[in-house]
């Protein structure tokens, strides 16, 4: 709880990318390459937030408006030593409020079927399971899609 007070959520800056890439590699078996992170920053600078604590980047989230009024979460991760300190929740709350301000009526995401921890995280935030998409990931694993309806 003390750590939470020291965490700052802010817009990403180009100099943050190496730290974000390093968290990607720690957290995902199919990490986004630097070129994709840079592309997302260039095309959606207002949909890319980082969490800063102890003078470094400890988490990030990317969420963009797609398909009309749907906010799509493309990635979220908290550096493992900083997990379970509400940093992921703070990132999601900020990006959801930004997506809402940009016209989203619904927020959607995909999560690996085996990633029970992340599913728990999203359920606690109020997301609901929608459907399973077989063979969604390159290694053949299914995705579970989850939705969060925003109040109108
Ligand atoms: C999912 C992730 C972003 C959560 O970040 P976080 O900063 O640890 O999340 P929070 O501390 O805000 O967690 C809030 C709640 O979510 C749930 N939760 C989070 N991590 C969990 C875990 N490993 N197991 C079970 N529940 C979990 C808990 O209910 C938690 O509340 P609690 O700590 O009071 O019990 C983080 O685990 C992560 O980076 N995972 C690897 C990358 C990943 O899988 N991203 C999602 C891809 S779809």
Image (cartoon, rainbow, N blue to C red):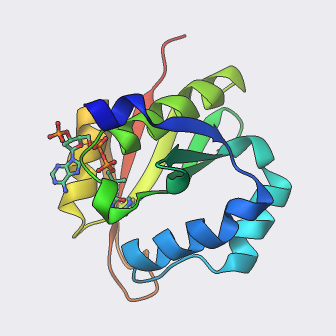
Left/right of residue 128 with respect to residue 91 in the rendered view:
left
Query: How many marks overall?
Result: 0
Task: Give 45 or 141, whichever is nearer the viewer.
Answer: 45
Residue pushed farthest bottom? 139
Residue at 68% of width from left, 67% of height from top? 17
Can residue 66 be seen in this snapshot?
no
Q: Tell me if I can see residue 92 in this picture.
A: yes
55 and 125: which is toward the camera: 55
Q: Is residue 53 left or right of residue 120?
A: right
Residue located at (71% from left, 37% from top) = 68
- Measured along the vertical axis of the image, is residue 148 above or below residue 111? above
Image x and y of residue 12, in percent: 70, 50
Q: Which residue is most to the top?
A: 152
Q: Residue furthest front?
A: 54
Q: Position of residue 2 (x, y in %)?
A: 28, 31
| 26 lies above or below 150 | below
Residue at screen point 78% across, 50% down:
44
Q: Quadrant of residue 14?
A: bottom right
Q: Is residue 1 above or below residue 134?
A: above
Q: Quadrant of the N terminus?
A: top left
26 sits to left or right of 101: left
Q: Which residue shows up at 69% across the image and 44% down it?
A: 47
């Amino acid at each position: 709880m003390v750590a939470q007070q020291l965490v700052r959520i802010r817009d990403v800056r180009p100099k943050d990318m190496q730290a974000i890439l390093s968290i990607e590699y720690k957290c995902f078996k199919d990490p986004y390459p630097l070129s994709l992170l840079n592309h997302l920053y260039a095309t959606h600078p207002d949909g890319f937030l980082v969490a800063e604590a102890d003078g470094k980047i400890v988490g990030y989230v990317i969420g963009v408006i797609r398909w009309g009024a749907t906010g799509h979460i493309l990635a979220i991760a908290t550096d493992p030593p900083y997990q379970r300190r509400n940093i992921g929740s703070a990132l999601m709350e900020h990006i959801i409020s930004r997506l809402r301000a940009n016209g989203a009526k619904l927020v959607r995401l995909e999560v690996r079927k085996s990633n029970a921890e992340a599913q728990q995280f999203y359920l606690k935030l109020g997301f609901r399971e929608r459907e399973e998409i077989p063979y969604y990931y390159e290694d053949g694993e299914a995705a579970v899609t989850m939705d969060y309806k925003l109040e109108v």
